[in-house]
Amino acid sequence: MEKRHAVVTATGSYFPPKVISNSFFEGYLDTTDEWIKTRTGISERHYVEKGVASSDLALEASKILLKKRGIGPEEIDAIVFGTVTPDMMYPSSACLLQDKLGAKNAYGFDVSAGCCGFVFSYTTGVMLVESGRYDKVLVIGADVCTSFLDMNDRNTCVLFGDGAGAVLLEPAGPDEGMLDTIQHVDGSGGKYLYMAGGGSLNPTSAETVAKNLHTVHQEGREVFKHAVTKMADVAVEIVEKNGFSLEDVDLFVPHQANIRIIESVAKRMKLPREKVMININKFGNTTAATIPSCLDQAVESGRLKKGDLVVIASFGAGFTWGSALIRW
Ligand SMILES: CC(C)(COP(=O)(O)OP(=O)(O)OC[C@H]1O[C@@H](n2cnc3c(N)ncnc32)[C@H](O)[C@@H]1OP(=O)(O)O)[C@@H](O)C(=O)NCCC(=O)NCCS
């Protein structure tokens, strides 16, 4: 019997309405619109209002997706929710979303993989469908990055935004859907990008808050260096390993952390700009939401069509990195 594949049958994305332009930071930090644009490619990003969590953003993206697919929430069998900003320690955001959406027949769980939250969740979702046990798997990438930002740290606060993306996976034939995936972890890179507070090592206390352990710590240059080489290598590897050439790739959808990372990766892959999906200018780095929101926008704008050969690739905290080769 031929192996069952999993294909994306619908997409959705959602960004909260509040738009924060670079001039917001100029008002109180030693930074400029020019620096942010040229060093990161970001012009604006979206922020939630107080009280809006990752599952709320995911809910909106999921509702759009279900409407496009024309099915009800009770048809979903499983929810795989990639996030580093779950609503709370537990229950998982997958459980909270399951309730809010009314996906009463779905089980689900969160995937914590830094900026690889979507790539790891998507590949996990694919495997659930490939196993033959589940027919409709909702994969989410959603983050409220503002929940971990130190708004006085110019090295990090200008980079991130809030948002959500969702894809629905369903069974497909052997030539469609995810053709292959490569995923990696190197835990020794953990020291370059982390949020140390609020977990079992440093439970929240007046002391952890005073030490700012509840916000992101990043060594930007080190992360940048690894992101470029590892993302490019894993994207090239998956294409060549499967007997394709880079010219066969119709669309490359990289994680959106910095336009200079994206451009360097595209250069190493010798891909022209029109084959690279970019939305960082309007949304910043939304962690797990970057790739699914790019996929949704690519579908909606007609840049991504059935039959296209797509490569997604990401790099993030952990270090984590990975790619997937998809026949859309
Ligand atoms: C963070 C990042 C944008 C910094 O850009 P960079 O060109 O590498 O800048 P550097 O870190 O070399 O810093 C250069 C200078 O700019 C300053 N700088 C940093 N942020 C600034 C800002 N918002 N405005 C003005 N200056 C800033 C630094 O303080 C530094 O000043 P110094 O030389 O006086 O110390 C970049 O390293 C990056 O994008 N890294 C990867 C981040 C990432 O991908 N994170 C998520 C993982 S998925």
Image: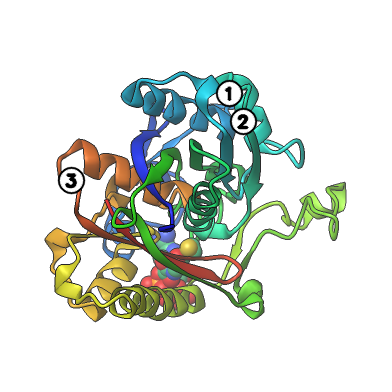
Residue positioned 23% across, 41% down in the render: 299
As displayed, is residue 127 above or below residue 90? below
Dividing the picture into quadrants, the one containing residue 302 is top left
Where residue 45 appears, as percent x and y from the top left, is 38, 42
Q: Which residue is mark 3?
A: 305
Q: Which numbered marker is on residue 74?
A: none
Dividing the picture into quadrants, the one containing residue 100 is top right
Marks 1 and 2, Cα distance to the nearest angstrom? Answer: 6 Å
10 Å crowding of disc 3: few (<14), some (14-19), many (20+): some
Residue positioned 59% across, 59% down in the render: 113
Marks 1 and 3, Cα distance to the nearest angstrom? Answer: 28 Å
The answer to whether the residue bearing label 1 lies less than 8 angstroms from the nearest atom of ligand 1 is no
Where residue 177 appears, as percent x and y from the top left, is 34, 52
Where residue 37 appears, as percent x and y from the top left, is 28, 57
Q: Which numbered marker is on residue 106?
A: 2
Q: Check whether the beta carbons of the residues at disc 1 and disc 3 lie within 8 A of each other.
A: no
Q: Check whether the beta carbons of the residues at disc 1 and disc 2 lie within 8 A of each other.
A: yes
User: What's the amino acid at mark 1?
Assistant: Ala
As displayed, is residue 159 above or below residue 228? above
10 Å crowding of disc 2: few (<14), some (14-19), many (20+): many
User: What's the amino acid at mark 2?
Assistant: Ala
Q: Which residue is mark 1?
A: 103
Left or right, 186 with reference to 171? right
Residue positioned 43% across, 73% down in the render: 227
> What secondary structure is marked by label 3?
loop
Q: Which of 93 and 178 lies nearest the eye of the viewer?
A: 178
Marks 3 and 2, Cα distance to the nearest angstrom? Answer: 29 Å
Residue positioned 20% across, 66% down in the render: 249
User: What's the amino acid at mark 3?
Assistant: Lys
